[in-house]
Image (cartoon, grey):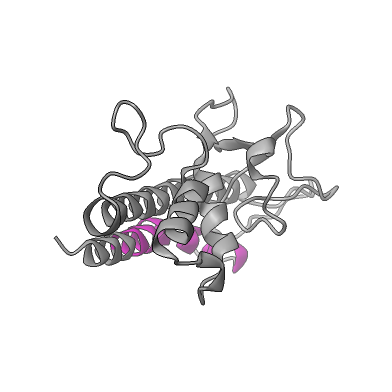
Amino acid sequence: MDILGFLHDRLEFVRKFYDTASEPFRDTIRKIENKEEPFVPPYSADGEPPFLEEWQACEESLRVLGQWSLCMVQISLKAYLKEFVERRALPNASRDAKGNWFEKGNWFEKYRKVFKDELKIDWSAAPVDISLLEEINLTRTISSTMYRFIVSVYARASSIRSASQPRFSETSSSGECCTPTGRRIVSP
């Protein structure tokens, strides 16, 4: 099996999936913002933006779709690294007593270490922004706890503190990235 081809195919699938699934939400937002049919605002004296609920629902849908797309990217990257190490490089390295690969702790950092120590491949010298890959990994370490009135998925602030410029989180008007409970919003 061509594992690099597998990774490429999976990432291409995620890209097409996101583009296709997000189109209706992006189209609705565009129509609302451009006041196109059927979102031509009626006269209103209350000052509230027309179609606010519809716009917010589309934004939330895009956020959730992006979160699950990132999950698929992270799972694909992890599967690629596991297969690479198992089949191509170190068939017996770094397994726990049960024969599992990196089940506890930061698996991404453990693979970086195996590549550097065993294969003499230093990811920090790569032409890829490793912090972006690292953040995808940390973003995927999400809590599945869904709040009663919130659809978004949250990550523990402690798990993404290392991201100096988070690309997959939102900031509040105060500039903070955490909810009052200390969880950080994760978005595409």
x and y percent of residue 184 in the render? Answer: 67, 39
Seen as rendered, the residue at the extreme bottom is: 127
Furthest residue in direction left, as rendered? 1
The percent position of residue 123, horizontal first and vertical second, equals 50, 66
Which quarter of the image is occupied by the N terminus? bottom left
Indicate whether 22 appears above or below 98: below
Residue farthest to the right, as pictured: 174
Give percent across and percent down for residue 59: 56, 51
Q: Specify whether residue 133 is in view.
A: yes
- Total number of numbered discs in the rendering: 0
Is 24 magenta? The answer is yes
Give the residue displayed 77% in from the left and 47% down from the top.
Answer: 172
Give the side of residue 38 with respect to residue 42, left or right.
left
Task: Identify the main secondary structure in magenta.
Answer: helix
Residue 38 visible in rendering = no
Between 49 and 126, the one nearer to me in the picture? 126
Residue that appears at 65% across and 44% down: 160
Q: Residue at x 70, y 45 (%)?
A: 161
Q: What stretch is highlighted in magenta?
A: 13-34
In the image, taking residue 177 as reference, residue 141 lies left or right, namely left
Residue 35 or residue 142, whichever sits in front: 142
Q: Does the magenta stretch include residue 27?
A: yes
Percent from the top left, x then y, of residue 29? 54, 60
Q: Residue 150 sits in which quadrant? A: top right
Placement of the C terminus among the 4 image quadrants: bottom right
* The quarter of the displayed image where residue 89 is located: bottom left
